[in-house]
Amino acid sequence: MRFLNALLTLLFVLTLAGGVGVFWLDRQFDAAGPLTQSTRLLVRRGEGAQVLAKRLEEDGVVRSQALFLAHYYTRRVVDRLRNRSAAQIKAGEYVVEPRDSVRKVLDMLNEGRAQLYSVTIPEGLTSHQVVERLKADQGLTGEIAAVPPEGSLLADTFKVQHGATRQSVIELMQSEQSKVIAELWSARAPELPLKSPAEAIVLASIVQREMGPNDDPERIAAVFLNRLRKGVRLQSDPTILYGMFGGVVPWGRPIYRSDIQQKSVHNTYQIDGLPPTAISNPGRHALRAVLKPAATNDLYFVADGKGGHVFSATLAEHNQNVAKWRVIEREIRARQKLAASEGAKRNGAAGVVAAVPGGGTGTAAQAETEGTAAGEGSGEETAVPLPERRPARR
C-alpha cells in the first residue's frame, strides 16, 4: 500500500508538473516577441527548422530558438495525433510585425501567408527576351526547360511566391495567355478577317510592336485588319527586324532600305497576309484591340512626333502626313545634333547624333506611288529613318 501511495503521489506530482510546464510553454508561445519594428523574413526553399530557428533568434524575430523548435515539434506531434497534416514551414518572403509571438510567426509560416513577389514582363518582348529577363531575376529560382513558342506568353505583372521557379512563371504566363485569348475570342467583333485565336495573337504581336506610348491600339489594329480585308500587304517594319534576327531581335535597330528587301517568312513587305508566327508577346490591350478594333477605313499611319501616329484612308492624305512628319523629323534631328555638339564641348569629345525617336509608321508609309519610299533619293542605304520606319521606342 505504501508503494502504491508513493507511486500515485509521484504520478500526481509529474502530472501536475507536466500541466504547469505545458501551461508555461503555452504562455511563452503567446508572449510578445522582441521585434520593435516590422521586418521582412525570407524563408529559403528547403531550409530546415533548426537552421531557420537559429536565424530567427540571431535576427531578433524570436527570443529563443529552443522555444520556436519546441512549439514546432509539439505542434507536429499534436497534428499527427489528430490525423491532420503535420505543421511545416513554407518557403517565401514574410513580414513579421512588432511583438509578434512565436505562435503567430509559426502560424504564418505554416499557412504560407507570404508576401507575394512581383514579376513584371513588358509588352512586346520576344519569348527569348522574356526567358533572359526571368533568368536575371534573383527573386526566382531554377532553370527554364526551353524557350516557349513566340506569342504564347501573356505580358503582364504576376504575383508569385518569392523563390518561385522560373519554369512555374513561364507556365503561369502561358496559362493566363490561354484564358485571356479564349475570353476575348468568344466576344470578338463580327466579320474579322481572322480565322483563329492563333491568328489574332500573331496580329496582336505586330500591333504591340507598332504602338507608341500615346497611341490608340484599336485604331492601329483597324489599319492592319483593313489591309487584310483588301488583300494589301501589311508592310509592318517590326516584322522586317524579326525576320532578320528572330527572338534575339534588337528592336531599336535602324531599318535600312536594303532591309526591306530581305526575304523571310516574317517580313510582311515580302509576304502576303500574316506571318506564320507571332513576332513578340503582346499584352491585353493589343489582344483586345485586334478582336475589337476601331471602326475606320484607315489604311496608313505615320508618326506624329509625340509618341503616337496620324492615320489616313487614302494615299494622298498619307503623303501629306508624311510631309509633315519630315518637317518634324528634321527639327528633331537638328535638336539632337545641337545637344550632341554641346555635350561634346562639355565632355571634350566628339558628339554622336542619336537616332530620331518616333520616326515613322511601320505600315508601308509609301508616298508618291505605292512601293516607293518618299523623298529618300536613289535608294542607297541610309540610317536616317525612312517614312516607313517604326519609331525607335525601346
Image (spheres, rainbow, N blue to C red):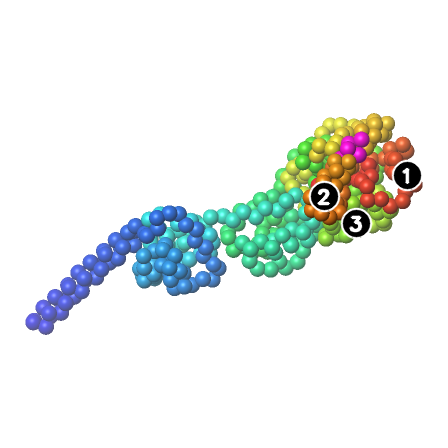
- Residue 158 visible to the viewer: yes
Mark 3: which secondary structure?
A: helix
Q: Earlier in the sequence, mark 2 or mark 1?
A: 2
Q: Amino acid at mark 1?
A: Gly
Q: Position of residue 178 (x, y in %)?
A: 63, 45
Circles 3 and 1: CB distance less than 8 Å? no
| The residue stretch that appears in magenta | 327-332
Mark 1: which secondary structure?
A: loop
The residue mark sitting in front, 3 or 2, is 2
Q: Position of residue 15 (x, y in %)?
A: 18, 62
Q: Which mark is residue 377?
A: 1
What secondary structure do most residues of the magenta stretch adopt? helix
Q: Amino acid at mark 3?
A: Gly
Q: How many marks?
A: 3
Determine the residue located farthest toward the bottom in the rendered image: 3
Neighbours of disc 2 within 10 Å: few (<14), some (14-19), many (20+): few
Q: Earlier in the sequence, mark 3 or mark 2?
A: 3
Cα–Cα span, label 2 and label 1 = 33 Å
Q: Which residue, given by chain and number where applicable, does mark 3 sit on?
A: 243
Q: Is residue 43 above or below residue 278?
A: below
Q: Is residue 138 above or below residue 200?
A: below
Residue at the spot 89% in from the left edge and 37% down from the top edge: 372
Circles 2 and 1: CB distance less than 8 Å? no
Check if residue 328 falls in the magenta segment.
yes
The residue nearer to you, when weighing 319 against 145, is 319
The residue nearer to you, when weighing 34 against 198, is 34
Q: Which residue, given by chain and number where applicable, does mark 2 sit on?
A: 345
Taking the image as shown, residue 27 lies to the left or right of residue 253, namely: left
